[in-house]
């Protein structure tokens, strides 16, 4: 499949496919190369140097495949290694960040929660980022939502929606019991927007913000008119096979199938 000036989008998990759909909706004629680096899953357990090596390798691969810009479609590595990644490669890289400032601006109580994987919410980089982006008098609670990410990665949210709703409802109830004044939460893993309907059922009075919104604006200068094609590439391991990944894409209702990276 020959692509015209494609935008590359990559992550180690299936959650980042949500970014593909958002880019496709905003730029319908943009060609996209989606790379699921399953052999590097999960990003969240890697050391700083391991993580940088993984995302640098993926970015260089996408550049070799003709991409004019790349989206690092994962909050955790964007917060932790985006700047050294940009310094190491020769193409534009757009990260995805927890929208702390936007969340605070929308909050009446000025108390918000950032939901993300454990490695991100416990990192010094995320703590600095939250401090830099909050306003005086506001509070930003960094919340480990790895258990909810697992509901997406395992496809429980599709295969067992009632169990998913029960777990999400319990998670949100526990969080609000500890911090009852929180009225805005950011879904700061690319997996979590797949659970938005479950979040809204659990807490209809809370605003849930998708960090992908900022990515679309940053991509605008690099977009072009192609044929609106999407090509999917993946790596695999014995436990995370290409066949299983394609079943996952099918379960999401996508028309795409991934081929194995050369």
Image (spheres, rainbow, N blue to C red):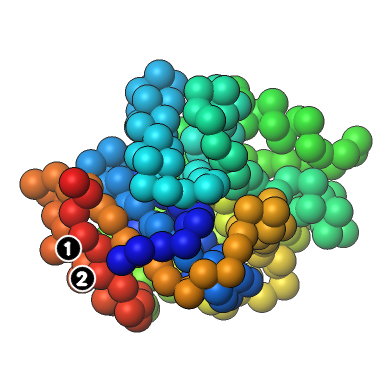
Of 150 and 49, the residue lying toward us: 49
| Residue at 55% in and 74% down | 29
Labels in figure, total: 2
- Residue 70 shown left or right of residue 103 in the figure: left
| Image location (x, y in percent) of residue 246 | 22, 67
| Image location (x, y in percent) of residue 141 | 67, 42
Local SS, label 2:
helix
On screen, residue 35 above or below 249: above
| Image location (x, y in percent) of residue 137 | 89, 38
| Residue at 25% in and 63% down | 258
| Residue at 42% in and 48% down | 66
On screen, residue 70 above or below 121: below
| Image location (x, y in percent) of residue 245 | 22, 62
Viewport quadrant of the N terminus = bottom left
* Image quadrant in which you'd find residue 160: bottom left
Q: Residues within 10 Å of mark 2 (few under 14, many from 20)?
A: few
On screen, residue 164 above or below 149: below
Q: Which mark is residue 86?
A: none
Residue 58 in sight here: no
Alpha-carbon span between mark 1 and mark 2: 5 Å
Q: Which mark is residue 244?
A: 1
Local SS, label 1:
helix
Residue 38 in sight here: yes
Q: Residues within 10 Å of mark 1 (few under 14, many from 20)?
A: few
Residue assigned mark 2: 247
- Residue 196 shown left or right of residue 186 in the figure: left
- Residue 97 shown left or right of residue 3 in the figure: right
Query: Decide: marks 1, 2 in contact (CB < 8 A)?
Result: yes
């Amino acid at each position: 499949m020959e692509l015209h000036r494609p935008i590359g989008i990559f992550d180690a998990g299936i959650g980042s496919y949500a970014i593909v759909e958002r880019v496709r909706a905003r730029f319908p004629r943009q060609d996209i190369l989606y790379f699921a680096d399953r052999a590097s899953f999960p990003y969240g357990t890697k050391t700083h140097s391991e993580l940088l090596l993984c995302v640098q390798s993926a970015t260089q691969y996408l550049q070799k495949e003709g991409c004019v810009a790349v989206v690092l479609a994962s909050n955790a590595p964007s917060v932790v290694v985006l700047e050294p990644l940009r310094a190491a490669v020769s193409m534009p890289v757009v990260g995805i960040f927890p929208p702390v400032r936007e969340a605070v601006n929308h909050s009446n109580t000025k108390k918000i929660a950032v939901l993300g994987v454990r490695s991100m919410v416990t990192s010094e980089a995320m703590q600095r980022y939250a401090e830099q982006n909050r306003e005086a008098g506001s509070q930003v609670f960094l919340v480990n939502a790895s258990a909810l990410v697992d509901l997406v990665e395992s496809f429980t949210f599709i295969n067992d929606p009632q169990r998913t709703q029960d777990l999400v409802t319990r998670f949100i109830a526990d969080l609000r019991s500890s911090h009852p004044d929180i009225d805005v939460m950011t879904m700061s893993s690319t997996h979590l927007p797949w659970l938005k309907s479950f979040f809204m059922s659990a807490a209809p009075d809370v605003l849930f913000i998708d960090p992908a919104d900022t990515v679309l604006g940053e991509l605008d200068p690099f977009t072009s008119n192609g044929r609106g094609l999407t090509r999917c590439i993946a790596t695999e391991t014995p436990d995370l096979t290409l066949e299983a990944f394609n079943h996952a894409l099918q379960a999401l209702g996508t028309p795409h199938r991934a081929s194995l990276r050369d």
